[in-house]
Structures are given as C-alpha cells and as structure tokens.
Image: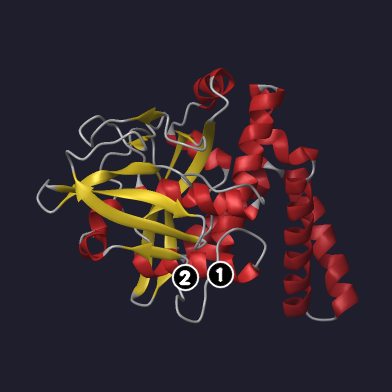
C-alpha cells in the first residue's frame, strides 16, 4: 500500500472512531514508558493485542459474528472456524474471518437454516491454489502431532498419498473454477513473491459415509479435493474420527480429458489419506457423492 494512502486511512479511522483512537494512544504511551523505546513499545503492544484478540476469539465473544444465527448454528460455525484456523497453521495460511465471507456475499442465515435441517453438514472454509506440496506438508505436520489417526513411518513419509494421475493434473483438482458461491481472495507470500489464495465457505456432508452412494461420477455435484482435505484436517485437529474409513467419495474435476475422476478414502489401518483415480463410469455400493451447499 502507498504510504500516503495508508496515512489517509489512519486519519479516516481516527476521525470515525475518536474514542478508540484515544484508548490506543494511551495504551501505546503506557507501553512506551514501560519499555523505553518506540520500536519495542510497538512490538510489545502488538503482541498484547494479538494475545487479547485470541482470548476473546476463544471465549463466548468469539461467537459475536454469528450471534444473529441463534445458539446451535452459531456454535457450529464458530467450532468450524476454530478448527479451520488450526488447519491454517498447518498449511501456513491465514483463514479469512467470518466478516470477510459475509462482505463477499455469503448468506450465513440461509446456511444456518440448512445446517439446522441436516446435522451431517459442516461449514468448511477452504483455500484453493496451494498446490500438492503444501497439502502434503500439512498432513505430515498433523501426523507428527501423534494425537490423531494419521501416521507416517520410515518407509512411508507421507500421510496424504495422491495417485500420479491426480498429481499430473492437480491444478484441476485444486482450482476454484466453479465455486458455487462467493469467494474471498487473500494474499500469500510465495517463493516468487506474493500470490493469492481463493477461499470458499460451503456446507459439506461430513457423515461417516457419502450422503449419496452407488452412483457414478456424472451424478454430481461433488465436494472438491481441498474441501475434503480441510474436513479431514479439521476433524483430526479436534480429535474426531476421520470420514471415509469404509467408503470412497468422488472429487470434483474430471481428469484425463474426461475419462477419469479422483476419489478419496481414508485407509484407517495404515493411517493415511489416499486419493486415487477411476473411470468416470465406475460405481459401487461404497462409492458416492457429498454434494456441497452454498
């Protein structure tokens, strides 16, 4: 941001919220007097504000963005966002706040109505464009915690195994071409500079097995790969059982010129998530769809 523009924004905020500005000025002056220098005082104040914000977020005040939705729906959204933030730490990305999704056009009231009607639906804040390596690194970090069902071994160093056909066209599985709802775009540092990550917020059937079983890939819509990976990491972060331990879920995005599609399964015996590919006409009693709601 241009410095002059930044200064204008600060002046505008000060004029709109004079009492808040006065309170922050007083807090800064106190910290400067305690710490002795402007730089240390600023760093100390920033750390204090971050700590206080985290405490508020984890308390009942963390429900504030969802208070208009009512008790059960508000708690479901807040629990989902808390789990997503933990996953964001594993992925190295910042999860947009609920207010950012609302500003982009997400209908929280409409989603809460669907939530109350179907207890298997889960709000899933989901990033797109992270790439294979970032997702696999996140699963390695989660497995390294040793607190869930995911594991790695000396022979198998990944907790997320993706078939070569899916890796070759991962950009299709990792794309946000048809979000089915509003998106939030966040900046993200990369090795080449600064990139962007697109986020969606949809409700996904997160029952033990797919909501619809026994149909081929053409009977969509389907959950995306990033969505189902978020679900698994969110559940693992909260100490909950992972899904698809005895079933397969089709994933959005046809591969190999429309001949193949990816599917997801949790190999409970090995403690690993597997993404492999099958012909789009493949079907069976344990293979199905988790149609998202936006």
Residue 2's image quarter? bottom left
The residue most toward the left is 257
Measuring from the top left, give residue 46's x and y in whole percent.
72, 65
Residue displayed at 79% across by 52% down: 55
Q: Is residue 226 above or below residue 102?
A: below
Left or right relative to 153: residue 164: left
Residue displayed at 21% across by 40% down: 282
Q: Which mark is residue 141?
A: 1
What is the basis of the colouring in this image? secondary structure
Q: Nearer the viewer, residue 10 or 86?
A: 86
Measuring from the top left, give residue 98's x and y in whole percent.
57, 40
Measuring from the top left, give residue 239's x and y in whole percent.
67, 51
The residue to which callout 2 is attached is: 137
Q: Do labels 2 and 1 touch, CB within 8 Å? A: yes
Quadrant for the N terminus, please.
bottom left
Left or right relative to 233: residue 161: left
The residue tagged with tag 2: helix, strand or loop?
Answer: helix
Measuring from the top left, give residue 69's x and y in whole percent.
64, 23
The residue tagged with tag 1: helix, strand or loop?
Answer: helix
Other-residue count near label 2 (Cα within 10 Å), few / some / many at <14 / 14–19 / ≥20:
some
Other-residue count near label 1 (Cα within 10 Å), few / some / many at <14 / 14–19 / ≥20:
many
Left or right relative to 63: residue 214: left
């Amino acid at each position: 941001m241009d410095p002059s523009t930044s200064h204008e924004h600060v002046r505008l905020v000060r004029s709109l919220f004079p009492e808040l500005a006065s309170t922050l000025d007083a807090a800064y002056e106190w910290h400067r007097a305690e710490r002795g220098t402007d730089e240390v005082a600023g760093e100390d104040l920033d750390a204090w504000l971050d700590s206080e914000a985290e405490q508020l977020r984890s308390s009942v005040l963390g429900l504030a963005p969802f208070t208009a939705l009512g008790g059960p729906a508000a708690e479901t959204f807040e629990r989902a966002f808390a789990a997503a933030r933990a996953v964001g730490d594993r992925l190295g990305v910042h999860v947009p706040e609920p207010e950012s999704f609302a500003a982009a056009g997400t209908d929280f009231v409409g989603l809460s109505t669907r939530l109350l009607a179907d207890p298997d639906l889960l709000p899933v804040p989901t990033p797109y464009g992270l790439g294979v390596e970032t997702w696999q690194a996140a699963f390695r970090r989660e497995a390294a915690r040793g607190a869930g069902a995911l594991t790695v071994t000396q022979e198998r160093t990944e907790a997320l195994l993706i078939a070569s056909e899916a890796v070759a066209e991962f950009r299709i599985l990792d794309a946000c071409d048809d979000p089915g709802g509003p998106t939030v775009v966040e900046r993200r540092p990369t090795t080449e500079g600064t990139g962007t990550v697109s986020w969606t917020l949809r409700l996904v059937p997160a029952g033990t097995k797919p909501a619809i079983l026994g149909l081929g890939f053409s009977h969509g819509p389907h959950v995306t790969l990033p969505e189902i990976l978020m679900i698994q990491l969110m559940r693992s972060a909260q100490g909950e059982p992972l899904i698809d331990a005895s079933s397969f879920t089709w994933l959005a995005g046809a591969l190999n010129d429309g001949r193949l599609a990816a599917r997801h399964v949790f190999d409970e015996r090995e403690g690993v998530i597997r993404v492999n590919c099958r012909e789009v006409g493949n079907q069976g009693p344990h293979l199905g769809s988790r149609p998202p709601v936006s």
